Amino acid sequence: ETGVTQSPTHLIKTRGQQVTLRCSSQSGHNTVSWYQQALGQGPQFIFQYYREEENGRGNFPPRFSGLQFPNYSSELNVNALELDDSALYLCASRTDRGYADTQYFGPGTRLTVL
Amino acid sequence: AQSVTQLDSQVPVFEEAPVELRCNYSSSVSVYLFWYVQYPNQGLQLLLKYLSGSTLVKGINGFEAEFNKSQTSFHLRKPSVHISDTAEYFCAVSASGRRALTFGSGTRLQVQP
């Protein structure tokens, strides 16, 4: 148990739709990152939020966006879904108290785009 | 930019045998190194991390890894594996602890009785 929860567990959408995935971090974790893990691959960094502002982004288009809230929860929004967006989406949270603080991962949301 | 190569996509091994999972990285700056484990239908759990100091790092569940700067490697080892170690293992790097993790493609460890 990492104290990081994600909802929903599974989700099925059709191409062109929009989706919102949610993450609840541990209390005190002011940094949250989102990763996309396609089947058979390692996670890829989407973006990171620190104190409610995006402060790092991977090679993902603008239709991937996020929000972070003061209550340690966050969202990943994906617009205009494409078939290749089918993947496990992981959020990870950590503190900002020192370098190399451990990132704690949630169990993920598995998104299927038909 | 950093990159991680995990040389073996699958490693079958018998129970109680030793195992080594290989990881090589590439980076133009100093990095921190991590090994994560992913059990079926679960998220990632940190096994161990190298930040600085001793190049031999001990982690949870009896795993250890050795950082070799000259060979840019961070191989994971366990002297005696159990059935419960069957999982996907990911090596990851970050340019600093505050930055994103770059993961390898993973190694599936299959422990057979």
Image: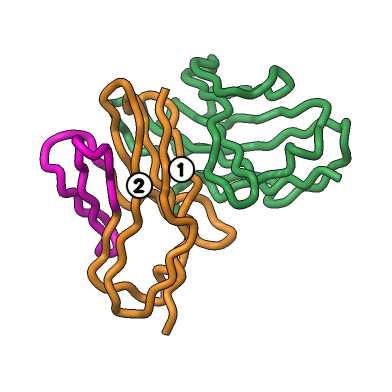
**Relative to B36, is B99 above or below?**
above
**Relative to A28, is B76 above or below?**
below
Q: CA distance from mark 2 to mark 1?
A: 8 Å
Based on the displayed image, in which of its 4 quarters is residue A36 positioned?
Answer: top right
Number of residues whose C-alpha sits closer than 10 Å to that of mark 1, classed few (under 14), some (14–19) or many (20 or more): many
**Residue situated furthest bottom in the rendering:** B113
Residue type, mark 2 in image: Cys
The residue pinned by badge 2 equals B23
Q: Examine the structure image and report whether residue B109 is included in the region drawn in magenta.
A: no
Q: Are marks 2 and 1 in contact (CB under 8 Å)?
A: yes
The residue pinned by badge 1 equals B104
Colour green belongs to chain: A
Task: Out of B85 and B30, give the one closest to the viewer.
Answer: B30
Task: Out of A68 and B1, give the one closest to the viewer.
Answer: B1
Question: Which quadrant of the figure contains the C terminus of chain B?
Answer: bottom left
The magenta-colored residue range is: B50-75
At horizontal 53% and vertical 23% (from top left) the residue drawn is A70
